[in-house]
Image: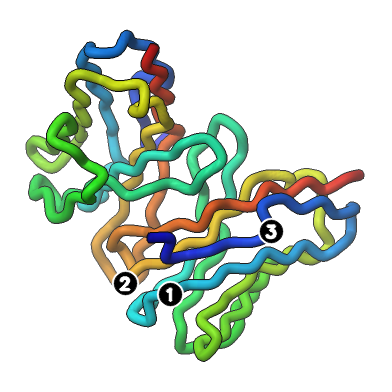
Amino acid sequence: QQQVKQSPQSLIVQKGGISIINCAYENTAFDYFPWYQQFPGKGPALLIAIRPDVSEKKEGRFTISFNKSAKQFSLHIMDSQPGDSATYFCAASLTSGSRLTFGEGTQLTVNP
Amino acid sequence: DTGVSQDPRHKITKRGQNVTFRCDPISEHNRLYWYRQTLGQGPEFLTYFQNEAQLEKSRLLSDRFSAERPKGSFSTLEIQRTEQGDSAMYLCASSVLGARETQYFGPGTRLLVL
């Protein structure tokens, strides 16, 4: 059972553009929603995370938008750079520090 | 480098053989997790430890898989009688039990079963 669904599977944007990746979850008990970035041959690295008591969180060029009623959350990367080219995973857990349930991933390519 | 380390980084084995992977968490991180990632997919949870206690195991963790964390420090993941379907990246992560827990991942061990 896929509890976190992520789209699109791949995304190509031009340098300076906005990258948007969407996720939807099923389990309403989830209360922690992190985004991870993974480069080839590396483990995932935490980018930004949000809890359902806020609708938006911004850190630098990265913003999470959260819609609790729709059970959806998204990652926005502003002013996308070629160095942002990586695979991005959304995830969810019941409490911070418990098992993470990951989406399928989005391969982002930012063209120079 | 004080991040999570995993050894070996790559392992090629023949079907039916046993393999063991090691994970060294970030110092003083009392939670340690194992995940499995296949090509083009997100990581899937296998099991996790709080100190030396194994608190949760996924249904993915068949009887051929066993994990230990003696003394609450490093952890090992053993796969017995490997099958081709075990080919994957095995990721380890660690975190500190507390209010804001971030799971820090290691580079993974890539297993290929021939």
Residue A94, numbered label:
2
Q: Secondary structure at mark 3?
A: loop
Residue type at numbered disc 2: Leu
Residue type at numbered disc 3: Pro
User: What colouring does the structure picture have?
Assistant: rainbow
Q: Secondary structure at mark 1?
A: loop
Q: Secondary structure at mark 2?
A: loop
Above or below, A66 relative to A3: below
Above or below, B110 relative to B58: above
- Mark toward the viewer: 2 or 1: 1
**Few, some or many C-alpha atoms within 10 Å of disc 2 (few <14, some 14-19, many ≥20)?**
some
Residue occupying image coordinates x 23% and y 52% = B31
Residue at mark 3 to residue at mark 1: CA–CA distance = 18 Å
Q: Quadrant of the N terminus of chain B?
A: top left
x then y, percent, for residue B27: 28, 42
Residue at mark 3 to residue at mark 2: CA–CA distance = 24 Å
- Which is more N-terminal, label 2 or label 3? 3
- Which is more N-terminal, label 1 or label 3? 3
Residue A26, numbered label:
1
Residue at mark 2 to residue at mark 1: CA–CA distance = 12 Å
- Which is more N-terminal, label 1 or label 2? 1
Callout 1: chain:
A
| Residue A60 in view (yes/no) | no
Residue A8, numbered label:
3
Residue occupying image coordinates x 67% and y 44% = A86
Residue occupying image coordinates x 51% and y 87% = A68
Q: Nearer the viewer, residue B34 or A2?
A: A2
Residue type at numbered disc 1: Glu
**Quarter of the view holding residue A112:** top right
Q: Nearer the viewer, residue A15 or A9?
A: A9
Callout 2: chain:
A
Q: Is residue A61 left or right of residue B89?
A: right
